[in-house]
Image (cartoon, rainbow, N blue to C red):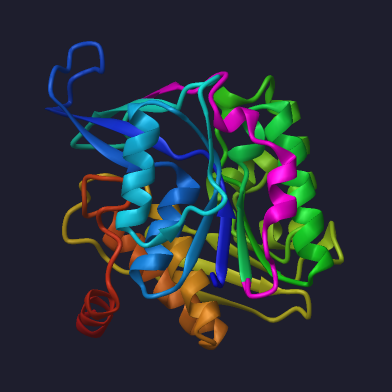
Amino acid sequence: MSEFLTIGEPISLFASEDADMSLAQATSFHKYLAGAEVNVAVGVSRLGHDAEYLTRLGQDPFGEFITDQLRENNIGTEHIETTPDYWTAFQLKQRVTHGDPGIFYFRKGSAASHFLKSTLDKVDFSHIKLVHLSGIFPAISEQAKEAFQYLIELVNRYHITTTFDPNLRPQLWASQDEMITTINSFAAQAQIILPGINEGEILMGSRDPEKIADFYLNQSEITHTVVVKTGEDGAYVKTKDGNSYSVSGYKADEVVDTVGAGDGFAVGLITGILEGLPFKEAVARANAVGCLAVQAPGDNDGYPTPEQLKAFMDKQ
């Protein structure tokens, strides 16, 4: 039985191999498995933990590719339903030598956006220790948002630990106001919040890590810990009881692709929690996996095995 569960929209990603060319100009692409939540599932599995993934896929080549990739990464697919009525999402990603790459989605009306809430009633939550939530899935459709809310209610009913990454995708929301209101509402229902400083500025108006942490700690009785990602500097942690500290980041030898770094951070933190590490050590692991992520081209290619993670952390 799986100890970790997440829900999301997995995507077939076509990453350009033509450096610093627009997506319109690029002609060479490589196909990867992508999607924020699936990235986390891949990383958690790679570090030796049983992971289960919830989604809905189309009965098409992209859906087959995703299912095969999930199984190759030892991620449970028992509750993934397929449908001939809707297609599986995909996206294009630019290759850049500086800054964040351009991305274009083909996901509106996808199979995942028609996820069935009733699927959640079939899930056995008895062995699940942690559920990771992301602000992307509820953005893809009203139906997905309703299912997401139902999942949160279920896991809170079973007193399962929850992590929530805002993962802002403005292009998926009808307006920025709706995005801010909805994301903060979901954050208030999770125990551990993982915002970045850029997300904090959008969601509550400040780039100050302590102010971001205070906002989420004060808006909810459920939230007990906020971990603010501060880029190369690492992370700032504050808890409900007022305890706070910073954890230094790791330096990348070469930044190849920044996409997937935040998901890698979640991987490190989640696996640290599952293994019972002191929270500060779990955050240090989160920083390490995030740093490894930016040194590989795919969204999750840089996520380490336990041996690779230990070697990287030992040499720093």
Q: Is residue 292 left or right of residue 56?
A: left
Where is 220 relative to 105, above or below? below
Residue at the spot 55% in from the left edge and 42% down from the top edge? 55
Q: Quadrant of the N terminus?
A: bottom right
| Camera-side residue of 311 and 271 | 271
Where is 225 relative to 193, above or below? below
Residue 14: which quarter of the image? top left
| Camera-side residue of 115 and 141 | 115
The stretch in magenta equals 103-129
Q: How many marks?
A: 0
Q: Is residue 101 left or right of residue 21?
A: right
Q: Where does residue 264 sit, x and y in percent of width and height?
A: 40, 59
Q: Is residue 56 left or right of residue 248?
A: right
Residue at the spot 77% in from the left edge and 45% down from the top edge? 149
Q: Where does residue 179 sit, x and y in percent of width and height?
A: 70, 32
Q: Quadrant of the C terminus?
A: bottom left
Q: Where does residue 274 sit, x and y in percent of width and height?
A: 53, 79
Where is 271 relative to 179, above or below? below
**Residue 128: in magenta span:** yes
Residue at the spot 68% in from the left edge and 19% down from the top edge? 174
Q: Is residue 304 left or right of residue 238?
A: left
| Camera-side residue of 250 and 87 | 87
Q: Where does residue 292 sit, x and y in percent of width and height?
A: 27, 62
Residue at the spot 30% in from the left edge and 78% down from the top edge? 306
**Residue 268: in magenta span:** no
Is residue 204 at least partly visible in the picture?
A: no
Is residue 314 at least partly visible in the picture?
A: yes
